[in-house]
Every structure is written in C-alpha cells, then in structure tokens.
Amino acid sequence: MKGTPISTWILLIFCLSKVAAAQSQYYSKSRPYDPTAEKVTNLHFFLHESLGGQNTTGLVIAQANITSNNSTMPFGTLYAVDDLLQTGPEPNSEVVGNAQGLAVVAGINSMTSVMYFDFGFTTGEFNGSSISLFSRNPLVMAEREISVVGGKGKFRMAKGFALLNPYVLNATAVIIEYNVTVIHY
C-alpha cells in the first residue's frame, strides 16, 4: 500500500474505531410488567425411582467418611437421580418426563434432605419445558411442600410449590405423588 496518503489511513482507523465502539455498546430494553400475563398451571404426576438392580435411577455418589450414624441415609450423603415422571403409580403408566438432580442428606438428627431437581417434560403440551425445584425436604413427613424456583420453555420465570405425598417407599422403589402449582408467563 505504498503511496497511500496518510489522511486515508487516519480516516480508515477513525471509521474502524467507530464501528467497534458501536458494536460493543451495552443494550437494555425494559418492558412494562403485566400481572395479567401470569398463568397458573396445576400438574399432577408420580415420580418413580428405582433403588436397586440394573435400572437404578437414584444412587449414592458421595458419603462423608466421618459419619458415625448407622442410618440407611447418613448425614452428608449425596445422591444423584434420573427418575421417571409418570401419569400414575403403576410401573406401566405413561411416561411424561424425567427428574434429574441431586439431593444431600442435610439433617444431623433428622431425616431431612436438601434437593435440587429439574423436571423435564417430554410429551404433551409441555414437551421441551421444565420446572426447577430447590428446597428443604423433611423426609419423615407424610405430606411435604417443595419450592418451585424456576423453569424454561412454557414455564419461563416459574415460581410456585409442589406438594409431595409418598405412595410407595421400600428398599427397592420410591413412588411419590406430586401435585404442583406453577405460576409462570
């Protein structure tokens, strides 16, 4: 580029700096809040967890080595889950999604866990959407309430609660009935 006037170079540098500055500006747009846009959805399904055999869906991934508690669920135990969500308590009922997440036994003197689960729906009106639950879960109570703290897809910006009722609890299976109220946009 021999022979290019210096004024052309200055003009080129000036133009490029303006383009770079324009593309790196912060962007913000506010929308008015419309409380009438809120929707309330009630969901009812059963969580099916298998605790043994070839198709285990809930298992221990870590356990504190200082725990002297002889409980079947000692303090500090961390579980990973990938459970089925089905329309009924029967093993052959329709699968509507799955629950993936973690639960840690957080009660030293009580059967309490803290759980984070993401419930992803794979059929019907909510296919591809999910809700996130994060809450304390007192395992010995017959009916428990868990917080819905978020969601995606049709459950974007979700909040609400889930009422849990144990249906089957034994050494090989856990089936829990979920009645969920989701407030979303």
Image: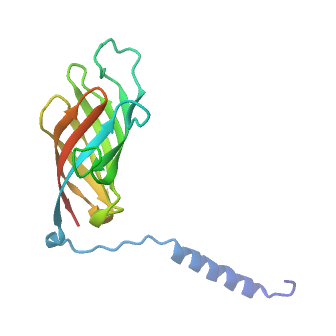
Query: Colour scheme of this structure image?
Result: rainbow
The residue drawn where x is 52% and y is 77% is 22
Q: Nearer the viewer, residue 14 or 141?
A: 141
Q: Quadrant of the C terminus?
A: bottom left
Residue most extreme to the right: 2
Left or right of 2: which side holds 52? left
Q: Is residue 25 above or below residue 123?
A: below
Q: Nearer the viewer, residue 139 or 169?
A: 169
Q: Is residue 101 above or below residue 13?
A: above
Where, by quadrant of the figure, is residue 120 drawn?
bottom left
Q: Quadrant of the N terminus?
A: bottom right
Residue 96: give x, y in percent of width and height. 30, 55
The residue drawn where x is 81% and y is 87% is 4
Residue 184: give x, y in percent of width and height. 22, 63
- Total numbered labels placed on residues in the image: 0
Q: Is residue 84 above or below residue 169?
A: below
Where, by quadrant of the figure, is residue 156 drawn?
bottom left
Residue most extreme to the front: 92
Residue 47: give x, y in percent of width and height. 26, 44
Where, by quadrant of the figure, is residue 21 drawn?
bottom right
Left or right of 119: which side holds 3? right
The residue drawn where x is 40% and y is 23% is 63
Q: Is residue 22 above or below residue 162?
A: below
Residue 159: give x, y in percent of width and height. 21, 55
The residue drawn where x is 35% and y is 58% is 122
